[in-house]
Amino acid sequence: MNRNLISRILQISLIMVFLISALVVTVRYQTVTVPVLNAPVKAGDIVQNSQISYAQLPAGAVFPGLILNGAQVSGQQASVNLDANQPLKTDEFVPAGTVRVPKIDPDFPYATSEDMSKIRYALPTDLLHADGGQISVNDYVNVQHRWSAKGSGLSAMFILQRVHVIGAADKNGVNLSFVPDPVANNKPKSLGIYYWYVALTQDQADMFAQLDWKEVYLYKTDFDKPLLSYGGQTVEVASTGSGTGIPTSTPAPRPTPIPIPIPGASATPGLGPTPGLGPTPGSSLPARVTPNPGPSGSAKPSASKTP
């Protein structure tokens, strides 16, 4: 190999090394411009355009949810306390005027003070059993029990009303603090939700444990709707509150049991604060049932308390 050839190979090698080095430096030190706050902001404050500055961030540090445009921040309300000169995330802001829910339970941000003493009950669900997918976390629901008994056909009765939905979980058991907006692709609100967490007293949770979850149907409600009743007796109310949808600390009065005569029945069952949960022979009115194992292989509701 002659000297000229060796010299040319060395030159080409040096050029390649230079080009590769330049490419590495360009990629590694490439930056993006992101908006930051030029002063700390407290949760609930509305961010003004004058509070927004810009900073350089390595391109490799970009992450999902990072805000890249100041217009996404201007006029928005901070949902948490924010420091100055820090990258901003979409989940740190809500539309101006949003009423903040006090997060007194870190695992269930929408739990209220009334929910604190209650059991966080995990109830399996699907679109059919969740009002066609229109339920979201922080909604209140009425609970209907539907069951079939041999020779008597299908029976149904609301067993609890104004139950607070305080959380949700996906099929992997990941606890979700909110349900995404359904606007995109016109998807139902609760698509992808496999469990609802509802706030129940111990007695109410014991009552739910006797039922196959496929017999339990949830219907969205609010405090402006009238209370449900059978024969003049109000169905048990799980939560109390005003038209704002935020419970108060004063519980609703429990109704006095009213005996309801049943033609042809040997005994006259009374409907207490919690309506009965199963059919009485010869009657269309439900009475309490024994635990229902449900279909083979079906998921069962479970009660769980927050650690």
Image: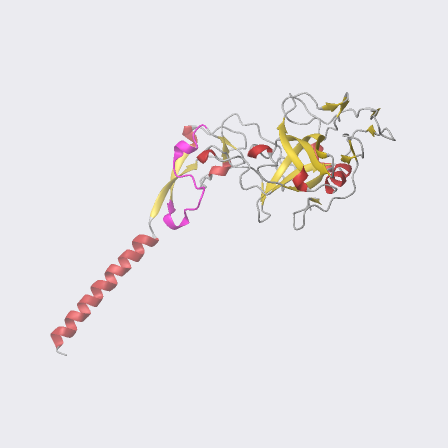
Q: How far across and how far down the image is residue 61, in percent?
A: 41, 49
Which of the 4 image quarters holds residue 99? Answer: top right
Indicate yes or no whether the magenta region holds residue 139: no
Q: Is residue 263 above or below residue 122?
A: above
Of residues 44 and 204, the one nearer the viewer is: 204
- Can you give x and y, in whole percent of width and height, for residue 50 in the image? 41, 29
Residue 252, by quadrant, is top right
Residue sticking out furthest to the front: 151
Q: Is residue 114 left or right of residue 168?
A: right
Instruction: Please report the residue visible at 54 percent of the width from the left and 27 percent of the height from the top.
Output: 98
Towards the viewer: 79 or 217:
217
Figure quadrant of the N terminus: bottom left
Q: Position of residue 100 (x, y in %)?
A: 58, 30
Question: Residue lying furthest bottom in this view?
Answer: 1
Q: Residue at x 59, y 32 (%)?
A: 131
- Give the farthest residue toward the right: 266
* Scheme by which the image is coloured: secondary structure
Above or below, 59 against 84 in this view is below
Q: Which residues are magenta?
A: 57-75
Q: Is residue 47 left or right of residue 4?
A: right
**Depth check, front residue: 140 or 45:** 140
Residue at (31, 57) in percent of width and height: 24
